[in-house]
Image (cartoon, rainbow, N blue to C red):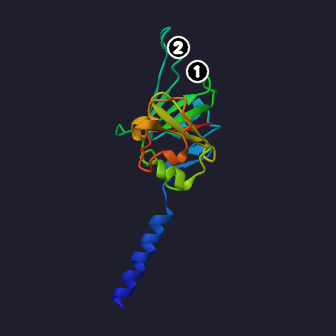
Amino acid sequence: MKKSIFSLAMVAITCFSCSTKNENFSIAKNSIGNLTSTTQVKDLETVFKNDSIVKFVPGGEFTASINEIEIFEKGGTKLLTLTPETIMDSTSVIQTVQVFDSRFTTEKGLSSISTFKDIQGHYKISSIDNLINSIVVSVDELSASFTIDKKELPSNLRFDMTLHIEASQIPDTAKIKYFFLNW
């Protein structure tokens, strides 16, 4: 009797803990945690009230176009870098989010430490762009793009930017270098 009650309690705890996913770290098409595609810069203090916000203040001719806002946990872990649509405008919405912390995951388990196999296995790839030192894999379903270093590719694909790279040519084990949400 004691074993069956203990077993039932363990099953209940396991089910409960699996269903209470932390929404502060969920990624969807137009949101990441409590941040949405309609959140304005002036609202970031409320959205990230438990975190540290570092806003870059341009001061010279060489830094006038830098427009990034970094979000850190109170312990110092870098979570996100946000790029507003308009520089120095508190009513601007966020245009791009770069994901640093691997706790941010999509409903299908994709995070900044995932591999190409994870992307391809869970989402329809919209395009693959061949750049100088990397490729960019876009997924319209998430409004996301994933940068993969060309060092992860076979040597015959690394140096020719004119090549059209297909998903079948990218190794399953290729790691994501950068994860962006593009609103």
Q: Which residue is mark 1?
A: 87
- The residue that appears at 41% across and 46% down in the rendered structure is 113
Q: Position of residue 112 (x, y in %)?
A: 45, 44
Of the 4 image quadrants, the one containing the N terminus is bottom left
Q: Are marks 2 and 1 in contact (CB under 8 Å)?
A: yes
Callout 1 amino acid: Ile
Q: Position of residue 158 (x, y in %)?
A: 44, 33
Q: Is residue 92 visible?
A: yes
Q: Residues within 10 Å of mark 2 (few under 14, many from 20)?
A: few
Is 7 placed above or below 117 here? below
Secondary structure beneath dot 1 equals loop
- The residue that appears at 47% across and 65% down in the rendered structure is 18
**As drawn, which residue projects farthest toward the bottom?**
1
Q: Indicate the quadrant where residue 37 lies.
A: top right
Callout 2 amino acid: Ala
Is 78 placed above or below 8 here? above
Q: Is residue 110 visible?
A: no
- The residue that appears at 42% across and 81% down in the rendered structure is 8
Q: Position of residue 6 (x, y in %)?
A: 36, 82
Please give left or right for residue 10 compared with residue 30 in the image: left
Q: Which residue is mark 2?
A: 64
**As drawn, which residue projects farthest toward the front?**
156
- The residue that appears at 47% across and 68% down in the rendered structure is 16
| Residue sitting nearer the eye, 75 or 15 | 15
